[in-house]
Image (tube, rainbow, N blue to C red):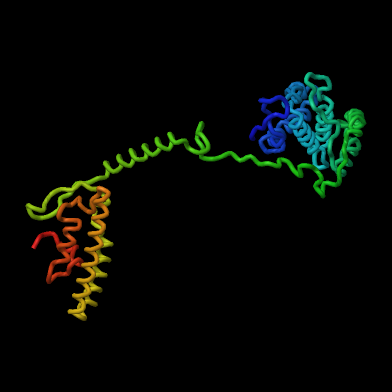
């Protein structure tokens, strides 16, 4: 749980009261109380409280607000074991534990510790507690009856009776009220929150270095061209060096359909193809001019086999398919 500034001296920090109503405290406290009651029921010794270190329980917290929540939750956990669903011996152990816890609060200390004088119980639980001596009717439990009656006489004035448990009068309504969930996937010592500029820069460099290593491991060198003037080797990534078979097949199928439509009107089809080719060339020239102003080059890594020059040659070829024949080698050689 988070920490809050103390209401006392400046600079002191204390645990917030909400911690004592959360699962981070309630669940372990219930286990400790259950172990205490079990040991008392098994050993039947008055020194169980001391042997398990409960004498130091009241020195766990010193801040008044937090101590108020701590005391109320601890007494509530003890009263949870006094219901009629528990065994008589366990109910007796819980009663003795509550009595000891309430009366063990330091009355004289420097600085003075906050204390409580009342125990909140619902009306139905109060009836069950007051009837506890009547349930001790076995030979083993009869000798506990005088002690139980004595303890009840000391507690009867401390009980603050609330309405029936059906209306949930306790505050908080149930404990734990806050559930603490541990974060998963967080490595030990990993910082939380936003990354600093230095951390972002280091992370970007590491990612770039990792990408460069992956590209080096997966690149391939292959030959291009057929003649002595056009042959050579190009090193590319494996994804670029592999032929896109499915995409090429789809392109060829669409191109065949277009050729069929253009062939229905030979003169008009040729004119439409010429206008489309000229529009593509003009657009690529504009792109090349814009790239040149930025010191860049569009499609120049393959020399005359790629880029604007090949597109211009393919568009100017007569008797062929123009730009639709790029896949078949249009524009590779000057006419």
Above or below 227: residue 22? above
> For the N terminus, which image quadrant?
top right
Residue 224 seen in the figure: yes
- Residue 165's place in the image compared with 153, above or below, is below
| Residue positioned most to the left | 228
Q: Nearer the viewer, residue 47 or 263?
A: 263
Q: What is the x, y in percent for residue 106?
A: 81, 22
List the single residue furthest toward the bottom: 265
Eyeballing the image, is 143 above or below 257?
A: above
Could one spot residue 142 in this view of the protein?
Answer: no
- In the rendered structure, the answer to whether residue 124 lies left or right of residue 7 reads right
Instruction: Please name whichever residue, 284 or 81, is drawn nearer the observer in this view of the structure.
Output: 284
Quadrant placement of the C terminus: bottom left
Question: Image point 90% across, 35% down: which residue?
Answer: 133
Residue depicted at 23% across the width and 69% down the height = 276
Left or right: 197, with 96 as reference point: left
Place residue 158 in its image quadrant: top right
Q: Position of residue 282 (x, y in %)?
A: 23, 63
Using the rendered view, name the quadrant where residue 249 is placed. bottom left
Tally of marks: 0
In which quadrant of the rendered view does residue 51 lie? top right
Towards the viewer: 166 or 231: 231
Q: Could you say where residue 10 lies in the image, as x and y percent from the top left?
A: 68, 25
Tell me: 29 left or right of 248. right
* Residue extending farthest front: 293
């Amino acid at each position: 749980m988070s920490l809050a500034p103390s209401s006392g001296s400046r600079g002191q920090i204390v645990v917030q009261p909400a911690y004592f109503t959360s699962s981070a405290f309630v669940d372990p406290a219930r286990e400790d109380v259950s172990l205490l009651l079990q040991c008392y029921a098994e050993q039947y010794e008055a020194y169980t409280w001391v042997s398990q270190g409960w004498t130091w329980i009241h020195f766990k917290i010193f801040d008044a607000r937090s101590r108020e929540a701590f005391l109320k939750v601890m007494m509530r956990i003890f009263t949870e074991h006094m219901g009629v669903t528990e065994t008589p011996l366990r109910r007796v152990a819980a009663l003795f534990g509550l009595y000891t816890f309430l009366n063990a609060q330091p009355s004289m200390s420097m600085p003075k510790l906050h204390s409580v004088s009342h125990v909140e119980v619902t009306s139905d639980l109060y009836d069950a507690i007051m009837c506890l001596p009547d349930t001790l009717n076995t030979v083993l439990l009869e000798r506990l009856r005088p002690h139980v009656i004595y303890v009840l006489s000391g507690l009867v004035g401390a009980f603050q009776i609330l309405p029936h448990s059906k209306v949930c009068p306790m505050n908080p309504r149930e404990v734990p009220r806050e559930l603490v969930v541990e974060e998963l996937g967080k490595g030990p010592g990993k910082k939380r929150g936003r990354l600093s500029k230095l951390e972002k820069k280091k992370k970007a460099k590491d990612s770039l270095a990792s990408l460069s290593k992956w590209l080096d491991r997966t690149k391939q060198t292959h030959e291009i061209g057929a003649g002595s003037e056009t042959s050579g080797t190009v090193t590319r990534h494996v994804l670029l060096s592999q032929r896109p078979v499915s995409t090429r097949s789809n392109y060829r199928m669409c191109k065949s359909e277009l050729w069929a439509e253009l062939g229905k009107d030979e003169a008009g089809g040729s004119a439409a193809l010429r206008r489309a080719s000229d529009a593509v060339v003009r657009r690529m020239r504009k792109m090349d001019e814009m790239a040149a102003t930025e010191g860049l080059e569009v499609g120049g890594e393959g020399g005359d086999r790629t880029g604007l020059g090949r597109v211009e040659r393919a568009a100017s070829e007569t008797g062929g398919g123009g730009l639709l024949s790029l896949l078949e080698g249009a524009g590779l050689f000057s006419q």
